[in-house]
Amino acid sequence: MLKQRIITALVLLAILLPALFYPGSHVPFACIMLAMISAAGWEWGRLNGYGPRMALFIGFEALALCVLSWTLGLLEVRLTGLWIVAGAAWVLVGGALLKVAVPGWPRIPKPLRLVGGLLALWVAWLAVVQARMIGVNFLLSILVLVWVADVFAYFAGRAFGLKFTRNKLAPAISPGKSWEGVWGGMIGVLVLAFAWVWADRAAGALVPSLYTHLAGRGWWLLVLGALFLAAMSVVGDLVESLIKRSAGAKDSSQLLPGHGGVLDRVDALLPTLPLAMMLASL
């Protein structure tokens, strides 16, 4: 399993890194993200009980929605209003879903679930590509936040959860997650944020990171913004876990051997990306 995970990770990096760092153009990266969003749309259809043909059609719908937006020039438009609406939806709907937990998901009409998932994927694609258009440093500061929150949460949860009585975060949704892990992830994100601001200044970064942008308007905003994004990355993770548990699935698919599916890898980014763009736009 470990060997398979490493091979898959190396293949993904070999595809993503050249596109991410392609000089002078965001087009290669946007195209790679189109493929990922299309795959995630297919997975979304399967998790919501649609058959193979319909799931493929849903993946195509996700692709078509993003391509249409690109054709209409939305990538060149300042989308502050969209980020605010999407961010508010993630906070309110995400909180409501976690409250009703696994039994509440099947009670939501299937067409509403379908549309909600497609919109979340579409907004995430717009956000990640616009972040790349701002600059690689800016985009990486968002992506690394989610990875650091996850890694620190894992190790803090294991260390303090084993040493003390583990306080379960959402036992009915994801039994392995604990409040100790959440606090550990937030501490890791704060360390990352301050370190990145220092690195931007030391290197004279031409394109500031999200953290430098927030710090420029007040250190209090940097702290609150980093903690908020870390918390919402947990919400994204838990929402996908809730949906998988309702569908009786361990992973969203097996598209990425050793890692599960695309949704398993991007679930925490779905709310974090538009919210980060919202904070950067205000």
Image (tube, rainbow, N blue to C red):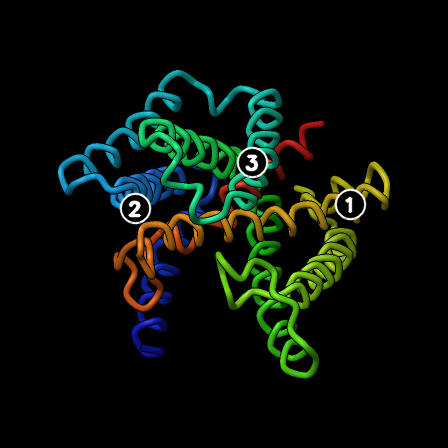
Badge 1 vs badge 3, beta-carbon distance below 8 Å: no
Dot 1 corresponds to which residue?
Answer: 224
| Label disc, if present, on residue 72 of the rendered structure | none
Q: Position of residue 186 (x, y in %)?
A: 70, 59
Element carrying mark 3: helix
Instruction: Identify the amino acid type marked 1.
Output: Leu
Residue behind mark 2: 47
Query: What's the CA distance linking mark 3 and mark 2?
Result: 19 Å
> Label 3 crowding class (10 Å Cα cut-off): few <14, some 14-19, many 20+?
many
- Which badge, 1 or 3, is on the more N-terminal residue? 3
- Outermost residue on the bottom side: it is 163
Q: Are marks 2 and 1 in contact (CB under 8 Å)?
A: no
Q: Position of residue 244 (x, y in %)?
A: 37, 52
Foreground residue, 8 or 92?
92
Foreground of the two, 195 or 221: 221
Which is more N-terminal, label 1 or label 2?
2
> Which residue occupies 76% across, 52% down?
197
For image coordinates 32% across by 53% down, the residue present is: 252
- In the rendered structure, the answer to whether residue 29 lies left or right of residue 226 reads left
Left or right placement of residue 54 versus residue 115 in this view: left
